[in-house]
Amino acid sequence: MKVYTQTDDLSIKNAVVTIGVFDGLHRGHQSLLELLRSKTIEERGESVVITFWPHPRKVLGQADKNFLLLTTIEEKKHLLENWGIDHLLILPFTKEFAELNSREFILEILVKKIGMKYLVIGDDHRFGHDREGGSEILSEMGRQYGFQFTSLKSCIDKQSRISSSLIRSALRASDLEEANKLLGFPYFMFGDVIEGNQLGRKIGFRTANIACCSDNKQIPEEGVYVVKVDIGNEQFGGMLNIGTRPTVDHTMKKSIEVHIFDTTRDLYGKRLKVSFLHRLRDEMKFKNTDELRLQLEMDRENALAILGLPAYQGIKKPLKD
């Protein structure tokens, strides 16, 4: 997948285009990408996803203080590349850019810069200043400039349109199962392993402390989770704690720590992908570290059962190579 942050010197054959913020790349977005892929084959062209960074709601002051993103730009690239997209154009979103009306956007960017031959959009998609652009303008300009377009009906779950906002709400309500169902895959984050205070290894549960790659990332609520951890091309099971570690830490500083099954390698400085599969329990405060260790042993057995792995017997092979 080729990635661009400007529209100069693009060379795309029979561009089949879709446009959106695509925060989370949930099931609704995935349906749009499926249509994009089929139209690209029909048109014997190349697929183009246009997205925006930063998030328009942030730039336009439409986001409240609790507004966080499901996917960072790095995570969005990762997801789209896995979909086999040919070209990703990340347009810098500014207040000046937001002033473009729909006709200017279609002509100057989609037609002249990208050479669009086909456009795929959701049935609720509007674009241009004040979102005035819709099917009427697209039909008129398509006849004039030689492109076609089609729209896809919104993806519905429980009589509600699947949206990034619904998924954020589910995560804030600690409903990981609902969030993952709406996404169509386990919610995940990229993060770098940083040095911790090494308290975990003293009670037999060595952990990797993770620094989230973005302050704007929506992190699941405090608690203990069953996770899968990608380290390079290897994948391991694990359990992860988000919280303040009240039994061993009195600073009340929130941390993210993952105990990875079946490996003792040094991970400092490594970039991990952590996928959240199941929420085991709330974070708890114990009387002492012995009680904490007993609970962690139970958590490990529960996590291994959910992952379909045998009971703990020491170091084993990764889930995949």
Image (spheres, rainbow, N blue to C red):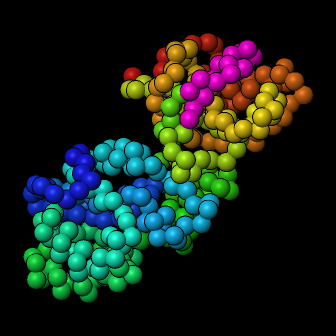
Q: Residue furthest right?
A: 287
Q: Is residue 241 left or right of residue 273?
A: right
Q: Residue furthest front?
A: 96
Q: Is residue 22 left or right of residue 257?
A: left
Kindly identify the residue that appears in the image at 67 percent across and 48 percent down: 221
How far across and how far down the image is residue 159, in percent? 54, 73
Taking the magenta stretch, the answer to whether it contains residue 206 is yes
Q: Is residue 111 left or right of residue 60?
A: left
How far across and how far down the image is residue 237, in percent? 55, 28
> Is residue 169 among the parts visible in the rendering?
no
> Is residue 299 among the parts visible in the rendering?
yes
In the displayed structure, 99 sits above or below 285; it is below
In depth, the one of 262 and 219 nearer the eye is 219
Q: Quadrant of residue 35?
A: bottom left
Kindly identify the residue that appears in the image at 40 percent across and 49 percent down: 73
Quarter holding the N terminus is: top left
How far across and how far down the image is residue 158, in percent? 56, 68
Task: Give the magenta part as a residue range.
Answer: 194-211
